[in-house]
Image (spheres, rainbow, N blue to C red):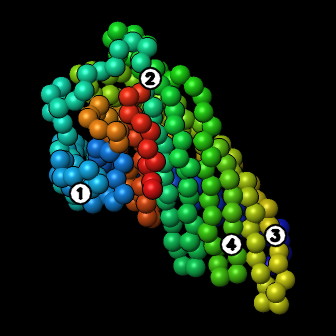
Amino acid sequence: MSVSMKGRILTTVLMFVCLAVTLTACGLQTIPGAGDQPEPQQPGGGGESQGPDDGPDPGPGSDPMDEQSEGPVEPEFGSDTLPCPPKGAMLYLGFDHALTINYGETSITHFLHEGWLRLMVVDEEGTIMPDASPSLTYSMEGKMSEECSLTSEGTMMPSAHGSCEAGVVSLFIEEDWLPLEGEMECIDTDGHIDIVPFNVPAMGLRKHSGQNGAGEIFYLVEGDAGYSTMRPFLEGEGYHTWTLYTEDMPIVPLVP
């Protein structure tokens, strides 16, 4: 197979992988802290076990993933949460994921390298707006076959806005996935190495507004691990995670 043909096939495959990563319907789970394992766990079960809590029953049209697991138990509105930050206070929204697709000989992992979006409370009503425009790096790596491996890298531009009421933060999160560039290395049976460069077009803007369209929900809770919302990747393995920190919470890695 020619190098140009390999490049065209690779680009097509990776476009489908990117679409699966950014468009797949994901079940929603919320957890306090940034847990190492996604195992369901009741709140208050210890500092190191940070599994998903139970929550409200899924509404009509919710993802089947929610119906297969217990609903999360979230803090009682306004009673188990910290007060909303005052005007001028900063919040930090952490982004992180590692999603893997396996199909036959192909195994590709899509990484969103850990990064943060700085947010500000802009008025006394608790309105939250972005205070910076960061660029987060994402990458894909793995193997297309026993003979071919790949590495690639791109940029994701995050943004978010929302509000806080009684310690409950609702955020509308946007992720703008820019083009991906990389190369595939193939070793022939005679030991000859082919390097195939490739480009995957931008996947574009993805908006996240929560299960009911009122925003992704975060609770301002005691502790320095923040409050995480995790979406299981239904097309493969892994989780997409957002974690909200207050300026009084030291930022800790989402994944050790």
Determine whether 39 is above or below 90 in the image. below
Residue 5 located left or right of residue 168: right
Residue 158 located left or right of residue 254: right
Q: Along the polypeptide, which appears first: circle 3 or circle 2?
A: 2
Q: CA distance from mark 4 to mark 1?
A: 35 Å
Determine whether 51 is above or below 228 in the image. below
Residue at (82%, 78%) from the top-left corner?
193
Residue at (34%, 19%) from the top-left corner?
85
Residue underneath mark 3 = 195
Residue underneath mark 4 = 149
Q: CA distance from mark 3 to mark 2?
A: 46 Å
Residue underneath mark 1 = 40
Q: Within 10 angstroms of label 3, few (less than 14), some, or many (20 or more) residues?
A: some
Q: Within 10 angstroms of label 1, few (less than 14), some, or many (20 or more) residues?
A: some
Labels 3, 1: front one:
1
Q: Along the polypeptide, which appears first: circle 4 or circle 1?
A: 1
Number of residue marks: 4
Looking at the rendered structure, the secondary structure element under dot 4 is strand
Q: CA distance from mark 3 to mark 1?
A: 44 Å
Label drawn at residue 90? 2
- Three-letter code for the amino acid on which mark 1 is drawn: Pro
Q: Is residue 208 visible?
A: no
Q: Quadrant of residue 4?
A: bottom right
Q: Along the polypeptide, which appears first: circle 3 or circle 4?
A: 4
Q: Along the polypeptide, which appears first: circle 4 or circle 2?
A: 2
